[in-house]
Image (cartoon, rainbow, N blue to C red):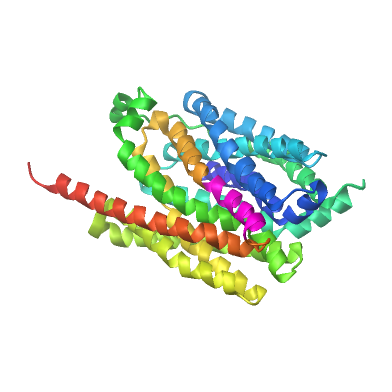
Amino acid sequence: MFTVAFLGIAAGLQMADMGLQAVSLAAIQTSFGVSDATLGALQGLAGILIASALAIPLSRFADRYSRKRVLLWLIAVSSVLMALSGLAHEFPLFFIGRSAAGITEFAMVPLVYSMIPDLAPERHRVAANLGFAALMAAGASGGFYFSGAILSAAQDLFPWGAEPWRKAFLLLGMAGLPLLLLGALTADPARRIEAADAASSASLRAFLLRRWRAIGLFAGVAGCLIVAVQALNQLVALALERRFNAAPGEIGHAMGLIILITSVGCLPVAGLLDRAMVRRVGQAVRPLIMGLSAVMAIPVLLLLTAAQALDHAFVAVGLFLFMTCTANALVPTMLQDLAPASLRARCFAIWSFVVSLFGASGPLLAGTLSDWLFQRHMLNAVAAVAVPALAISAACALRSFLRTLKEQGLAARPA
């Protein structure tokens, strides 16, 4: 329990800088004089795509060597890069720094999800997965919620005349030192490799070829869903600041609460739905939950674009994030069931990269449409990207649901 809790806190702290960056986008744009499309690339390409791509070779170390040792190195490097990002005086250097920091953050999540099945007994595995997700979400939301406090504390702590957002990144990077000391007390579990896993895990390529249909369909459902989520999540602070002329601290405080409540609150809901419906439709319940959540998120997003007050917009954002978080809550458990133990970290890293191919396009497309088509009305640009993506995700989920039902029916027939 202590090690799982540490894993959640560590991942949450590493994700907190993404919330701080989202709240500070307007200040970052002013510092470097870049366009909305460039900010979309920063939030999509630097924060997600490049990071998850290079996390794949890093995850190979996690499948072969001590996962605890790899984890501590990732925390140390990520903290240093987080601090150095604030010192970059040219946007290309800042972009490279954020990309490099994201690499270590994305490598950490596959490593953790490969450790949890070896830390928790089977009957507690879902609870451990959801508990880790809750702690990680709490840390990620803290980047939004405490952004104003972090900016103020950094301004007071570092007296030189740099922009507050630069000092905030430096302060957040310094938090990695006590985390490393705490990590020395955690367990380094041995891998539990079953006989069936040992027989099927000789080749990652063979595993992917054997299960390519299920993996590809899952990537379509989760990938299109993440397009919508990232288009909103990465740019919503800037969109609300422009639309309602609100202060970054006010938006960050509210978004921190919203992200925490939705990310944690969806977990018991998803668990209860899975438990209640799995007896009737088996594993097909998971694509069903994802598809229904995507469909219900579409009208909520349209309501967000029509909101006339900031409070109404926050309510719409909260409903949207709750539905999409519910859709994604059981994904780690599904992948753990699918992947052999000796390939688990690499499978999670590949999944992160494939999903990130879609996720990077969300903020990138929304930022480009904001510049070229919507005259910097960011909320309208986000909706133009997210609504079609949600519709495609729901269609893929329906196909996955029907396919899984068919497979279960064939498996249940007597020989």
Looking at the image, residue 225 lies above or below residue 335: below
Looking at the image, residue 11 lies above or below residue 142: above
Highlighted magenta segment, given as a residue range: 359-373
Locate the C terminus and report the quarter of the image it occupies: top left
Task: Name the image quarter holding residue 327.
Answer: bottom left
Magenta segment includes 401: no
**Residue 26 appears left or right of 130:** right
Residue 18 pos. (x, y %) = 66, 49
Q: Toward the viewer: 256 or 8?
A: 256
Task: Name the image quarter holding residue 239.
Answer: bottom right
**Visible in this render: residue 115?**
no
Residue 352 pos. (x, y %) = 49, 40
Q: Toward the viewer: 171 or 17?
A: 17
**Residue 172 appears left or right of 277:** right
Residue 163 pos. (x, y %) = 85, 50
Magenta segment includes 364: yes
- Which residue is at the far right? 160
Residue at the spot 32% in from the left edge and 30% down from the top edge: 209
Q: Toward the viewer: 189 or 208?
A: 208
**Residue 319 appears left or right of 401:** right
**Visible in this render: residue 343?**
yes
Task: Name the image quarter holding residue 248.
Answer: bottom right
- Which residue is at the far left? 415
Residue 32 pos. (x, y %) = 80, 46
